[in-house]
Amino acid sequence: MGTSHSVTLDWEKCIGCTDCIKRCPTEAIRVHNSKAEITDARCIDCGMCIRVCKSHAKKAMTDSFEKIYDYKYKVAIPAPTLYTQFKKIRDPNVILTALKKLGFDEVYEVARAAEIVTEYSRHIMEQEKVVSPIISSACPAIVKLVEMRFPSLIPNVLPVISPKEASARYARRHLIQKGIPAEDIGIFFISPCAAKVTDSRYPDTFDHSEVDGIISIKDVYKLMLPIIKNMQPDEVEILQTSTSRGIGWAATGGEGLASQVYNHVAVDGIENVIEILERVENNKLDVEFVECLACTNGCLGGPLTVENSFVATNRMAKVKKYINSLGKTRELDMYRDNIELDWQYSLTNKQVLKLDDDMVVALDKMERLEKIFKTLPQIDCGSCGAPTCHALAEDIVQGNANIEDCIFMLREKVRDVAQNMVSLAGKMPPSIRHIDKQ
């Protein structure tokens, strides 16, 4: 595994089952010598392997909470998914106050930045600068999926930074304007998602992320729980700046609803997303805006969350209802400043089925690949360590596997060897050959 991803493998825990290779949407995993291997060039950090691994051998490399103490002024920017993780808590101010009690000096909501990103996205859509139907860029796993499996749709992707990155930029500028030295400020994203960890550490569409560290919701949750349990009502600070519109971004359809694009489709779950993107690619989807989220129920189903995504969806509705009726917010002038919300760089074609740089060699390999594939049983059993028979054929022509890795091909070969041995036994020299005397 390379260094540009957050999803990693714990070899000690891996038992060599094939659950992960069958569910990986980009065929990034192989099992060799009873251990999984993740191919860096194919991984989109969607976290599917983290969810399906019964051995808990896959994990996202986030920062420890202690890293916040590397900075004098510690800032939390929580994803709105955090508001849905605590039973019977409806007021985001309770959760934001708990973060401050945990050790952060300031808390700025990603949900508020989502509202600003929404307005900017609408501006871009009205100017028709992006090919229709426009595909949301909010989910970094989906952006990578487009680069890897649907490069023809790159012109359709909305070239706007994520609410997480916008929140970090607003926060840093605001605090510097207040006189806090830039080197003292540490901005930490509280993340439900492995892909957002990677997007912060290794951004593709801009030079440098303003996020200094990423802590998983799971890690923060267990620290916050006793604080919230013992918090008195008069201790709750009014820290919320967002409305239900921004908070709703965490759920499937939230961005489309906030953007007020009537003719849009919202889809979650990586397999469903692939199906919808195939329709877009084949010009079979008559919509203006496509909201795609890799996880079931959107960010509420992120692999770094605590709560079941369907329970979290129920709580999201309750949180939004509370905000709309009893919610209290504070005013911050920091969002009046303009920050750069456009990408610096465009997406690139990262298709991985590139058999060779030399076109002649690549065509030869492709021909061999198809021939090998026709000899395989084509049942995609995964026992060879590759997700499909076609993937095994690709691995063979690339020199990364053998035809005998297929258990059915091996069985045929063993049968041939046995038959040859029987045939050879009948051809023993006359001096030792048994003669049947009658």
Image: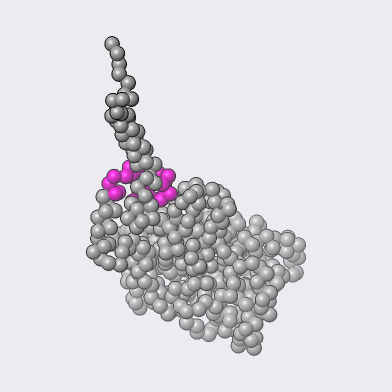
Is residue 127 in sight in this rendering?
yes
Which one is nearer the viewer's eye here, 433 or 79?
433
Q: Is residue 185 magenta?
A: no
Residue drawn at point x = 53 percent, y = 60 percent: 8
**Along the line of sight, which residue is nearer the eye, 421 or 166?**
421
Question: Which image quarter is the C terminus in?
Answer: top left
Residue 244 picture location, percent across and down: 55, 67
**Magenta stretch in the rendered image:** 372-391
Image spot of residue 95 (x, y percent): 66, 66
The residue nearer to you, when weighing 94 against 59, is: 59
| Residue 275 can be seen, yes or no | no
> Exactly how many numbered labels are in the figure?
0
Residue 401 spot, x, y in % from top left: 38, 52
Q: Residue at (60%, 76%) from the top-left corner?
A: 187
**Which residue shows up at 35% across the image and 47% down it?**
403
User: Which residue is situated farthest in the top direction here?
Assistant: 438
> Vertical placement of 211 versus 33: above or below?
below
Seen as rendered, the residue at the extreme front is 431
Q: How is the image coloured?
A: one colour
Dividing the picture into quadrants, the one containing residue 75 is bottom right
Residue 382, magenta (yes or no): yes
Q: Residue at x 52, y 64 (%)?
A: 6
| Magenta part, dominant SS | loop
Q: Is residue 232 rendered to the left or right of residue 410? A: right
x and y percentages locating residue 7 in the rendered image: 52, 61
96 sits to left or right of 131: right
Above or below for 52 versus 120:
above
Q: Quadrant of residue 158?
A: bottom left
